[in-house]
Amino acid sequence: MNDRIAQKAPAEPSRRDILYIATGAAAVVAAGGMVWPLISQMNPDASTRALASTEVDLSAIPLGQIVTVKWRGKPVFIRHRTPEEIKAAEDVPLAELPDPEPDSKRVQKPEWLVIVGVCTHLGCIPTGKAGEFDGWFCPCHGSTYDLSGRIRSGPAPSNLEVPQYAFLSDTKIKIG
């Protein structure tokens, strides 16, 4: 009996088999057409995607100045640091810092500091070139940050955040 089954040629598909396959394929395409708009509407709209990153021209920022740009609804401070400010930020002993982090880990190029301008204590916006370390000072609760955006005193638990950014050229960066 096994010999008869092995020698039997496969049956040709009937019209009914072809109709079943075609009907199943049409049902899959119709279901995909109905589900696609439901999934697609969950994507962020164009205005939200536009806020995901921002480009900044650094050539307009003079030495020693701070510029604030908006990224994802938050202020981002870009500081064009002087050689004296760079040296002061690099010379801070890490043992003195509540949240120790070397300056070199917070910047890609020493002359440009890019940080999110939101206090890590309660989300206030610190003022620049203020406080005892000439960095940032949060007037709400007295947190003081240094020239590298590191917490030096006050109730803030950590340093100001460094956003993801990349240099597109010597004079242009992309944040986000």
Image (cartoon, grey):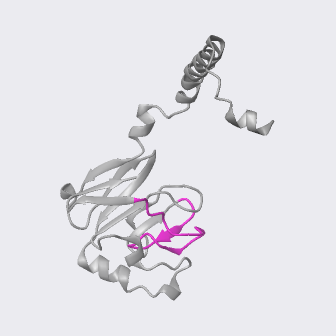
Q: Is residue 52 left or right of residue 100?
A: left
Foreground: 89 or 128?
A: 89
Give residue 10's quadrant in the image.
top right
Magenta stretch containing residue 154, yes or no?
yes
* Magenta highlight: main SS: loop
Q: Position of residue 174 (x, y in %)?
A: 32, 53
Foreground: 39 or 109?
A: 39
Magenta stretch containing residue 109, yes or no?
no
Foreground: 76 or 163?
A: 163
Check the picture and name the quadrant holding the N terminus. Answer: top right
Foreground: 160 or 27?
A: 27
Q: Position of residue 161 (x, y in %)?
A: 48, 63
Which residue appears at 31% of the width and 64% of the height? 79
Give residue 29's quadrant in the image.
top right
Q: Position of residue 84 (x, y in %)?
A: 27, 80
- Which residues make up the magenta segment? 140-164
Residue extending farthest to the right is: 1
Q: Is 117 above or below relative to 28?
A: below
Q: Is residue 176 left or right of residue 143?
A: left
Which residue appears at 48% of the width and 85% of the height? 94
Q: Is 35 above or below relative to 154?
A: above
Image mark count: 0
Which residue appears at 24% of the width and 78% of the height? 83
Q: Is 83 above or below relative to 130?
A: below
Q: Position of residue 110 (x, y in %)?
A: 30, 74
Give residue 142's quadrant in the image.
bottom right
Q: Is 44 above or below relative to 159?
A: above
Which residue appears at 43% of the width and 80% of the height? 102
